[in-house]
Each structure stands twice: as C-alpha cells, then as structure tokens.
Amino acid sequence: EVQRLVNYQANVASGMAVHDDCKLRFLELKTKRTHRFIAFKIEENQKQVIVEKLGEPAQGYKDFAACLPPNECRYAIYDFEFLTEGNVPKSRIFFIAW
C-alpha cells in the first residue's frame, strides 16, 4: 500500500517522522479523490516530512511537474486517470521519489 511506502521511505531515507497531515491528505486523495497530487517535503528543522503542495482535481501532470524543484528532494503521490482500450475509466496512484 502506498501509505505504508510513504511512511517507510520517509523514515528510512531521512530518519524523520511523517506528519499526521501527510497521512490524512493521502487518504483524501485515495478515497475521496479530492487531490490530483500531493508533494511532500522533508522539513529539517522539525525533523519530519510535511505536505508542501496539494494539487486540485482539475490540475494535470504539467501542474504537478511544475511544483517539483529542480535541485531538491521531494516525495510525491500522483493520481493518474486514464481510459482502457475498452474506454473504461481507471486510475492508478503513483509514488514518486524526486
């Protein structure tokens, strides 16, 4: 599950805790589809991973890519929607280590 991966990756890579808001926003994306993407940032001063940016459902991949800084680490989740060959709407949630 992506939620466990977010917690694991953040803790292993940084030795930092994951703020509860990260888990809440992920559950909103997963169950309610209230966000297109979530960008997480390691907050060095607080020693934890926090939510940096929430993408609106109408935003797309370009908006997502634009929120990622070129020279800094981020974790992100992106909800990708697509149509199958039979025109059935589907979605997949991707975890991205940037």
Image (spheres, rainbow, N blue to C red):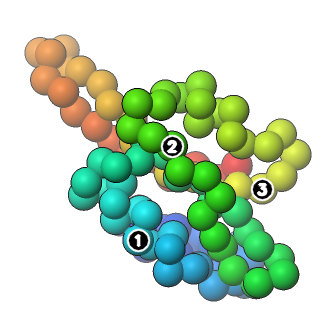
Between 78 and 24, the residue placed more toward the observer is 24
- In percent of width and height, residue 38 lies at 53, 52
Is residue 78 visible in the rendered image? The answer is no
Residue to which mark 1 is pinned = 24
* Quarter holding residue 36: top left
Q: Amino acid at mark 3?
A: Cys
Residue under label 2: 55
Q: Earlier in the sequence, mark 3 or mark 1?
A: 1
Task: Name the secondary structure under disc 2.
Answer: loop
Amino acid tagged 1: Leu
Which of the marked residues, 3 or 2, is nearer the chain's N terminus? 2
Q: Residue at x 15, y 16 (%)?
A: 87
Q: Nearer the viewer, residue 77 or 36?
A: 36
At horizontal 74% and vertical 69% (from top left) the residue drawn is: 42
Point out residue 31 in the picture as x, y percentages from the top left corner: 24, 58
Question: What is the CA distance from the residue labelled 3 to the residue labelled 1?
Answer: 21 Å
Of badges 3 and 1, the one in the foreground is 1
CB contact under 8 Å: marks 1 and 2: no
Give the Cα separation between the discs numbered 3 and 2: 18 Å
Q: Amino acid at mark 2?
A: Gly
Q: Residue 49 vs residue 85: left or right?
A: right
Residue annotated with mark 3: 73
Q: What separation in Å lies between label 1 and label 2 (alpha carbons)? A: 15 Å
Is label 3 or label 2 in front?
2
